[in-house]
Image (tube, coloured by chain):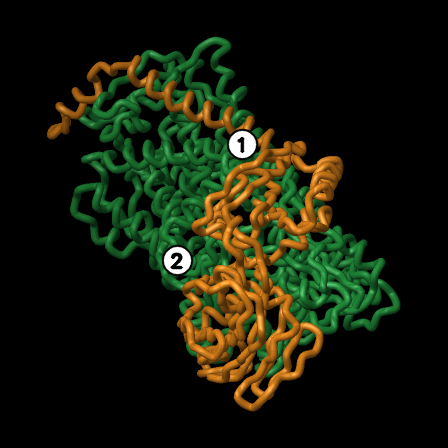
Chain colours: A green, B orange
Amino acid sequence: MTPRATRRLTIAAALALGLAVVLLLARGHRDVGYVRDEGIYFHASRAYADWAVRGLQSPSVLFDRPARDRAFAVNHEHPALMKLAGGLSARLFSAPGPGGQPPETRAQPGLAPIMPEGAAMRLPAQLLAGLGVVLLFLAGAGLTRKRPVLGDSPLSAPPASPRPATPVTDLSPGTSSPREPNLSPETSSPRATDLSPETSSTLGSSRVFATGTAPAADPSPGTSSPREPNLSPGTSSPSDLSPETSALSPLIPAVLAALWFIGLPHVWFHAGLHCFDVPVAVLTLAVVLCYRRALASWRWSLLLGPLLGVAISVKHNALFIPVLLGVHYLACLALARRRPSRGQLLPLPFLSMALLAPPTVLALWPWLWSDPLARLGEYLEFHRLHAYYNTEYFSINYNQPPLPWSYPFVLTWATVPTALLLLAAIGLVLAVRSDLSSRPSADLCPARFTAPLRGHPARDGLLWALFGLFPLLLISLPTIPIFGGTKHWITAYPFLALAAAFAYVTLWRSLALTGRARHLPAALLPLLLVPALWSTLHGHPYNLSQYAPLAGGARGAADLGLMRGFWGSAVLPLLDDLSERPGPLHLHDLHELARLQYEREGRWPPGTTSAPLTRARAALLFHERHMLSNEVDAWNHFQNSAPLDVITLDDVPLTSLYAGSK
Amino acid sequence: MRANSPRLASFATLRPVPLDATRRRAAVLLGLVGLVAAVEWIAAARAYRSILGPADWDAAAAALAALPPDEPVLLADDWLGPTARRHLLPLQRSLGRPDLHGAPRFHVLALGEALPADLRADLGDLAPEPLGVDPLGPLTLHHFATPSGHVLWDILDQPALLAADRAGPCRKAQRTWVCKHGRATVRHAEIAYRPRRCLAIDMSDGAALELRGRVDLGARLRGHLGFTDFNGRLRNDAPAIVELELDGVPKARWLVSDNQGWAAFELATTPGPAELTIRVTNLLAGTFNPGGYDPETRRIPCLDLRAITEPT
């Protein structure tokens, strides 16, 4: 297959997988109850979209401060972008709510009413999850290229020497060097497929590194060729592998990277919600891929700032992105072991982030349009002083610092299959080791500020390590709240996925299999991915409470005393029970705004109203360690400790319905 | 080796590679990852399925029905509680027991370990003697004996006690004493994240509830005090005072704080009838929040007290 055909196939497969993910999320998450936060976001989305639509009809509304503030005051502790997108999606796709209800309590029909209002509001986040899969797929596919070069556009480069490939299995550190600098702007223009981080490992060089082709001979004596990490440190030499042995299909790491991420039960659960956690993870990945290109291309630099602004407009996690990119950039300069040029001291990618991201954030968050500094300060202060909610960890309820530093690491192990984590760890070690020892060519031209690292090794391993470990390290600080479980460090997972795919490619390449054995990497891929997919399929729609196989699944986690769930979403099967006993119901952890959303869509049992426990005839109880006090209150109220019905995941109670004769 | 010159660097890259070692390392790492993945397949097959079906619950119900009704039946796996109580009503009888003292024989229904940490804590210094095990499919019913006497008197069952606060006698209505300075109710309460059945004493700050009456004593009076609920415990650390008098003579005084959890106390007694007075003073019943002291959001002490005989 020609490189162009391979590329087309890869793009087609990426798009197909992304689309499949969006369709599965859109349909599958109709079985996932609305989580507490979604109830508030639904309410905010309607207010924001109403303002936007009125603004489209009469632009003067956009500048009417009282009207704008009324709309965006709702849930102003989070940026508006995803909620605005959700509200507009509902305006497009929402099916009408049931007749017989006042208009304000039922969903209004959209222009193409094809799904419930809540599902329509979830759609933008699901589309972003699909985009994440596409990006990971393409980035993973790039890992099969023998000598990835950052900033390069492989297929637009001149063809390589037709001589038989002499790829190296020597993966030793310290042997990377760039080739002739590519000064053509065409080779680094923004293109969708160029988002692959592994299309290059040396910024700005112009070479073809497609599967099965070899780099041209290095014309500059004394410079060594870029290598992949060597499993045997300190040794290096070309191997005698045939081209056939190096032909690892790009689809293998592509599938591994994409499914490593989206196939995890907690990622899948969050990916379908009208929330911000998977969207910000995807946008973090997008910004990092863009940054990588921006180091050798002014066009990508100009895109980088606004893209960062979009990420920050999704969730505050993105505020850390420029800091981490700065660390990576400084590391690249330091590892180059040469005096930085003037252009490198004021690089365009960082200028772009500094100058273009803030106005983007401002533009996408109308709440900030009035009194921006004070409101921004209020926003940052809210998250700096966030309340410590309750969470269970090894049978201890934590609701105040010091919080256990091991929490994010243990929860990651408990929710991500160990083989995938192991592969990611190997990938990080191999890639970082290689990055720390590779150096740019001695004859590299001075870098300009528009392409500050053109010709330098890309050091993707450092990027993966920074973005894959920082979220976990941050949450491990004893004063950082831990109530949200894995969703708080879900931004790390795309980078761990890429590291795992890199390890898979590198290890198989090192084996240099021939003959039928060449198909082993593809044949054994399911061995790695099935535990995660099994976990996710089996846990649906309760994947917030699902755990990895070695943790023992939900039962094992219950034995270990790990968090069961925290969002009041496991409720849908109980709605049938509730319809048989109308009356006042204590909602417990189900948010009233989430209940109203069910009601707007005609899914809530008629005649069942929310009430405090003291007046309730039935009560929902979402099981968490600290919720025992609420459960005990229900026993006392109903004089009965046997629930009428229980929702379970593998025998583990998630939600109980209590009722009494009262 | 670090190449210091282009010539040396070039030479360095041409060193022969111990290819077998490289391959071997790659094979080992891939083998390790594959092995872990294979183990995960097996673990997934075990983890991702329900192991308790209706027949298992029916078998457990039949086994529990055959047990003497006055012997406690406990569930080892608390997380299974809601489902288990739904199928096995006898489990409700023992729900919220103060501990395993006063139970010469008891039974444990377990999916895994028979005596997990919570039950071992309830045993305290009692050494349980296993009497037998009934396998009930995935569940197991364990029978134990302990060197404990039996309960002669329980404050939660005793209607004859008189209650008073400093403003005078309290009125008794069903499970509640209503007093001038508050109320005391026999109910379930969450204490240290476990359910306990106890006398919840919700009095105003510094007010004491006094219970008095003639009771039959055994070898010891054993009780507990804890605070409910977890939110209140987070926002108020003030202790409560428990005082015991027998025949008008002060015998013991304990200061209990919420970081002691379900704090046990004990007093050796002479068997026979005696006039018992127990007084509980909660120094602060409200909670502290960023706005200051909030007397409306309560943190309530909960008491249990029993007279227990010598082991027979």
Q: Is residue A13 left or right of residue B238?
A: right
Q: Is residue B43 above or below residue A584?
A: above
Amino acid at circle 2: Leu
Q: Name the disc covering residue A625, or none.
A: none
Residue corresponding to mark 2: A403
Chain containing the residue with disc 2: A
Which sits in the foreground, A344 or A620? Answer: A620
**Residue that lies at the very extreme toward the left in this rendered image:** B4
Q: Is residue A187 left or right of residue A438?
A: right
Q: Is residue B213 above or below residue B144?
A: below
Q: Residue at x 69, y 46 (%)?
A: B68
Q: Is residue A641 left or right of residue A348?
A: right
Element on which disc 1 rests = helix
Asked if marks 2 and 1 fall on the same chain, the answer is: yes
Element on which disc 2 rests = loop
Amino acid at circle 1: Val
Which sits in the foreground, A61 or A643? Answer: A643
Which sits in the foreground, B222 or A106? Answer: B222
Please rate how many residues cluster around mark 1, counting C-alpha atoms within 10 Å: few if below 14, some from 14 to 19, many from 20.
many
Residue A386 quadrant: bottom left
